[in-house]
Image (cartoon, rainbow, N blue to C red):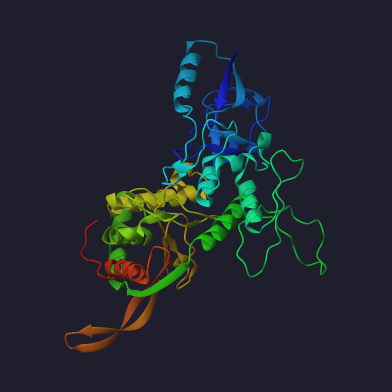
Amino acid sequence: MAQYELLLPKMGESVAEATIIKWVKQPGDRIELDDTVLEIATDKVDSEVPSPIAGKLVKQLFKEDDIVQVGAVIAIIETDEDSAVFNEVVEASAVAQETPAAPIVENIPGVEQLEFAASSDRFYSPLVKNIAAQEGIQLAELDNINGTGSDGRLTKDDLLNYIQARKGGQSVPAKDTAASPVAKPVAQPSVATQPVKATAPSTTTSVSGGDEIIEMDRMRKLIADHMIMSKQTSPHVTSFVEADVTNMVMWREKVKRNFEKRENEKITFTPIFVEAVAKAIKDFPMINVSVNGTQIIKKKDINIGMAAALPSGNLIVPVIKNADQLNLVGLTKSVNDLALRARNSKLKPDETQNGTFTLTNVGSFGNIMGTPIINQPQVAILAVGAIKKKPAVLETEFGDVIAIRHMMFLSLSYDHRVVDGALGGSFVRRVADYLENWDTNREI
């Protein structure tokens, strides 16, 4: 008999921890190679942890809802293999599950100014450090905040509750006080507040008897927190443009069958939109930025997130990395692959990270336009509406005529701290220009 230590695998450069949401295998269960042992969740996606070896699960080292660091041993698997074959598998798996160095904060200017040094024995996740950096909270102050996580660990919700209480002028219990987590201040209807941890659903039945109380799932809570934080962080402005995309529609209709036969992929409008956005970002690079205090961080890479609706009704934003370096075939394959795996909960955590701009297609729900909320820490998000046939005035050499054209609205929401109307309006107009001036003879 030999025992194998199953590690929490590395899930991307910016992912340092995950929450165990479900043990699929229980102690005593037989496990085959690549069987899913447990399901985990990061701040962005849910993932499965497969077993790199066959055997029997003998011990679970963490419980459901525990937060675990990447590289930690999470389970013990007993295998009948006791030969060199097992040793080779263990060595190969050790490479695949290589434990990364101590978690680091993303390279955001200003974060390194925080005094997170060896003077504290308490662990702080990169997310907590980033929030602390944005709020100007130093290590000494963090060390005194009451934590509700495992072993008194400070969670994101603990820190947000602390910040909210501090802004409201309430006293905050220190870490060593007996109590319960930081008291939540009473929300004032006219004042925006920080997101707070959702409370358990009330057991009180409704007076009418016809209402139903539904507790948000984990992903919906994260989305809610992120949306509230975005509206509190960025003064949102939205600019609109109507585009005549008749040439684009006719071109896609002409090439889609041959393209699908040749590439075994359907070509939708989404990769065309992504290509136009990537080109416009190159023309207006100050749209491709983020903000840290008074610093504007200009991004080198063009990583475009595409909002995707999930069967559960939730939303996720997989990211096409270096979108400007892909041709239309490459963009089509990336879009289709990410969309399919998003719907099937097969995305890797790193595939939802490091986006620099987001595209959302509200037209897929029959909407002609929308005013989307910025996906922080980005500064702009583009919504594309439904394509509708409408009468439009065309200028010809023989005078103006009215014709039936394929029209659509583009709406760009942007952060008015750093994007003024001239830049935001010019950018969305340029995206429309690329779509309107589509070459109907383009080869793909």
- In front of the other: 28 or 72: 72
**Residue at (59% x, 57% y) in the render:** 224
Q: Is residue 40 visible?
A: no
At 36% from the left edge and 74% from the top edge, which residue is drawn? 241
Residue at (53% x, 43% y) in the render: 129
* Count of marks placed on residues: 0
- Judged left or right of residue 198, residue 425 is left
- Asked whether, in this view, residue 51 is left or right of residue 432, the answer is right
Q: Position of residue 438 (x, y in %)?
A: 25, 67
Residue 80 drawn at (x, y percent): 59, 15
**Quadrant where the image shows the N terminus:** top right
- Whether residue 373 is visible, yes or no, is yes
Image coords of residue 12 (percent x, y) = 45, 38
Q: Is residue 287 left or right of residue 64?
A: left
Instruction: Work out whether residue 156 or residue 326 is closer to the camera in this orientation and state it.
Output: 156
Front in this rendered view, residue 341 or 208: 208
Residue 220, given in percent of the width and then of the height, sits at 60, 55
Vertical arrangement, residue 252 with respect to residue 126, above or below: below
Residue 314, above or below 235: above
